[in-house]
C-alpha cells in the first residue's frame, strides 16, 4: 500500500510541478528555496526550460512576423502613393505644355471627380464650374486629344459629355484632311473601342490610318486630335461610309483635363 501511495504522490507531483514550471517565470528562485532542489533540478528543470523556451520563442517569432508583414504593407502602400503622385505630376506638366497650343481660348485645369458606373462611356463630372469660368458647350481635352464637351455646369462642378456617348443630341463634328480637300463626319455612337463616325458620301477616299480632328463649328475649337481610322464599313442603306475611329485617349482612364472656353 505504501508503494502504491508513493507512485500516486509522484505522478501528482510530476503533473503539478510541470504545470507550475510552464507558467512561472521565476523558476530559478523557486528551485533554490526548495528542499528538493536536487530532484527538481534533475527532473523538472529540463522540461521547464524546453517548454518555456519553446513558448517564448514562438511568441517572439509571431510578433516579429507580424511586424515584418506590417512594415512590408506600409512599404507597398508608400510605393503605390508615390507612383500615383508621380503619374499625376507628369500629367499636369503635359497639360501645362499643351496650354500654349490653345492661345485663343481660356484654359481651365480640371480633374474627374465622379463617373456613372451604369453609363461608363457617357459622362463624367469634373471639379470646376461656373465660378471657374466654365461655360456650356466648351471643349474638354486631355494630353491625348478631345475628350468631350461640357453638357451642364453648376457653380462648382460640370458634367462632360464624352465623345464615346451614344446620345444623338449635340453631335460632335469632325474632319479628315485629304490634301486640299477635307472630309466631314459626325460622331454617331460608340462600339468599344471605337467611336463611330458617319460620312455623307462613300466617295471620299478615306483610308485606314487617316486621322480624325474636331471640325470647329460655332466657336468650338478646331483641329483637336481625336483618333485614327482603323475600320471602314458601309452604312445601313449603303449610301455612305461608317468610320471606326480609335481615340488616342484611354477612355477608361480619364483623370486630369483641360477645359477650353471662349474668352
Image (cartoon, rainbow, N blue to C red):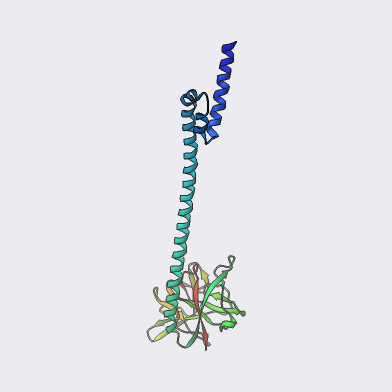
Q: Is residue 124 above or below residue 53?
A: below
Image quadrant for the N terminus? top right
Q: Nearer the viewer, residue 84 or 223?
A: 84
- The answer to which of 240 and 263 lies nearer the viewer is 263
- Along the line of sight, which residue is nearer the eye, 250 or 69? 69
Determine whether 182 is above or below 65 in the image. below
Query: Residue 93 in the image: x percent, y percent?
Result: 43, 76
Q: Residue furthest right?
A: 154
Picture quadrant where residue 134 is located: bottom right
Tell me residue 25's x, y (percent). 52, 36
Q: Going 54% across and 72% down the picture, which residue do you hit?
A: 112
Left or right of 157 on screen, residue 212: left
Residue 78 at least partly seen:
yes
Horizontal and vertical percent position of residue 12: 58, 22
Q: Residue at x 49, y 48 (%)?
A: 66
Name the residue at the left extreme: 179
Q: How many marks?
A: 0
Q: Could you tell me which residue is drawn at 49 percent across and 76 percent down?
A: 257
- Please state the horizontal and vertical placement of residue 24, each as a whole percent of the image: 54, 34
From the viewer's side, name the closer residue of 40 and 130: 40
Position of 168 relative to 85 (above/below) = below
Q: Is residue 239 visible?
A: no
Amino acid at each position: 500500500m505504501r508503494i502504491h501511495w508513493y507512485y500516486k504522490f509522484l505522478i501528482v507531483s510530476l503533473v503539478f510541478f510541470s504545470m507550475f514550471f510552464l507558467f512561472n517565470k521565476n523558476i530559478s528562485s523557486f528551485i533554490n528555496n526548495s528542499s528538493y532542489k536536487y530532484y527538481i533540478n534533475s527532473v523538472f528543470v529540463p522540461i521547464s526550460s524546453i517548454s518555456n523556451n519553446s513558448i517564448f520563442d514562438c511568441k517572439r517569432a509571431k510578433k516579429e512576423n507580424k511586424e515584418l508583414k506590417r512594415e512590408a504593407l506600409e512599404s507597398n502602400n508608400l510605393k503605390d502613393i508615390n507612383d500615383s503622385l508621380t503619374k499625376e505630376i507628369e500629367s499636369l506638366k503635359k497639360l501645362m505644355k499643351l496650354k500654349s497650343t490653345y492661345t485663343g481660348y481660356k484654359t481651365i485645369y480640371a480633374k474627374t471627380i465622379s463617373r456613372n458606373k451604369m453609363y461608363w462611356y457617357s459622362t463624367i463630372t469634373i471639379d470646376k464650374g461656373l465660378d471657374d469660368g466654365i461655360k456650356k458647350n466648351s471643349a474638354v481635352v486631355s494630353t491625348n486629344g478631345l475628350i468631350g464637351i461640357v453638357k451642364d455646369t453648376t457653380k462648382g462642378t460640370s458634367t462632360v459629355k464624352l465623345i464615346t456617348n451614344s446620345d444623338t443630341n449635340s453631335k460632335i463634328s469632325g474632319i479628315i484632311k485629304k490634301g486640299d480637300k477635307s472630309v466631314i463626319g459626325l460622331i454617331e455612337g460608340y462600339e468599344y473601342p471605337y467611336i463611330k463616325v458617319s460620312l455623307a458620301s462613300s466617295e471620299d477616299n478615306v483610308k485606314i490610318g487617316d486621322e480624325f480632328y474636331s471640325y470647329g463649328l460655332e466657336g468650338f475649337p478646331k483641329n483637336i486630335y481625336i483618333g485614327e481610322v482603323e475600320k471602314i464599313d458601309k452604312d445601313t442603306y449603303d449610301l455612305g461610309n461608317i468610320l471606326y475611329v480609335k481615340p488616342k485617349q484611354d477612355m477608361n482612364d480619364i483623370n486630369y483635363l483641360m477645359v477650353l472656353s471662349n474668352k
